[in-house]
Image (spheres, rainbow, N blue to C red):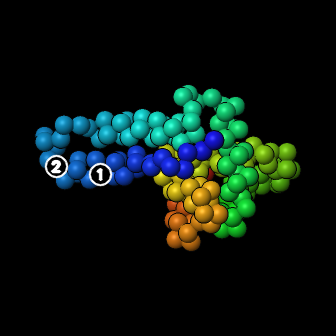
Amino acid sequence: MYNTQFKVKYYDIEKELIQRFNEKEKEENEYTMDDILDICSKLYRDEFLTVFGMEDFLVDKINEHMTYIYEKMIVNEGFKNIFEEMMNIYIQQFFKNNEKKNENEESIKQLILLFLFSQQLFHIMHKCVCQQFELGIIDNELLVELRNNSVEIIKQIIMDI
């Protein structure tokens, strides 16, 4: 249900291509920045599907996978703290009076999980899932990296809404 042996590379490739792009003069680049971002976005989608053993983005299948991942990951106290912090940020922004928070809690969990597997975070989240599934523990430095990136990105996204 989750391929922990697969090495996610889209993020490193994107960083390298952007660095090369920035080091060259405009006329020397064979690709535009949009080309690079499009290529890496496609690579991310392909790697996402590969990790989950899927050929297409099917909502029901993705939700099933996310539920499975959540159940396996939430037992890790460090991950649980990050997840709860992200949920609280989301809830505070969109459910100020907490009236419908409980009604929407499962949807919020799914949304946070999808966010953790977004292109911005998948390269980190994949490492966390692999460590948790294979070792039963996630390296503290990796948890710090996940927390720093996920919390800051979700705050930024919410501020843009």
Q: Which mark is residue 55?
A: none
Q: Which mark is residue 16?
A: 1
Circle count: 2
Q: Is residue 13 visible?
A: yes
**SS label for mark 2:** loop
Q: Position of residue 2 (x, y in %)?
A: 60, 44
Nearer to the camera, 133 or 12: 133
Residue at figure coordinates x 62%, y 56% from the top left? 133
Nearer to the camera, 135 or 40: 135
- Mark 2: few/some/many CA within 10 Å (<14, 14-19, 20+): few
Q: Answer with left or right where residue 13 lies relative to residue 155.
A: left
Q: Position of residue 46 (x, y in %)?
A: 46, 35
- Mark 1: few/some/many CA within 10 Å (<14, 14-19, 20+): few
Disc 1 and disc 2: Cα gap in Å? Answer: 13 Å
Q: Quadrant of residue 96?
A: bottom right
Residue beneath label 2, please? 24
Q: Position of residue 114 (x, y in %)?
A: 62, 44
Q: Answer with left or right where residue 34 lies relative to residue 50.
A: left
Residue at figure coordinates x 53%, y 36% from the top left? 49
Residue at figure coordinates x 70%, y 68% from the top left? 77
Q: Quadrant of residue 153?
A: bottom right
In the depicted structure, whether residue 20 falls above or below residue 46: below
Nearer to the camera, 7 or 143: 7
The mark that comes first in sequence, 1 or 2, is 1
Amino acid of disc 2: Lys
Quadrant (top left, top right, bottom left, bottom right) of the N terminus? top right
Residue at figure coordinates x 16%, y 49% from the top left? 24
Mark 1 or 2, closer to the camera: 1
**SS label for mark 1:** helix
Amino acid of disc 1: Glu
In the depicted structure, whether residue 31 falls above or below residue 103: above
Q: Answer with left or right where residue 5 lies relative to residue 43.
A: right
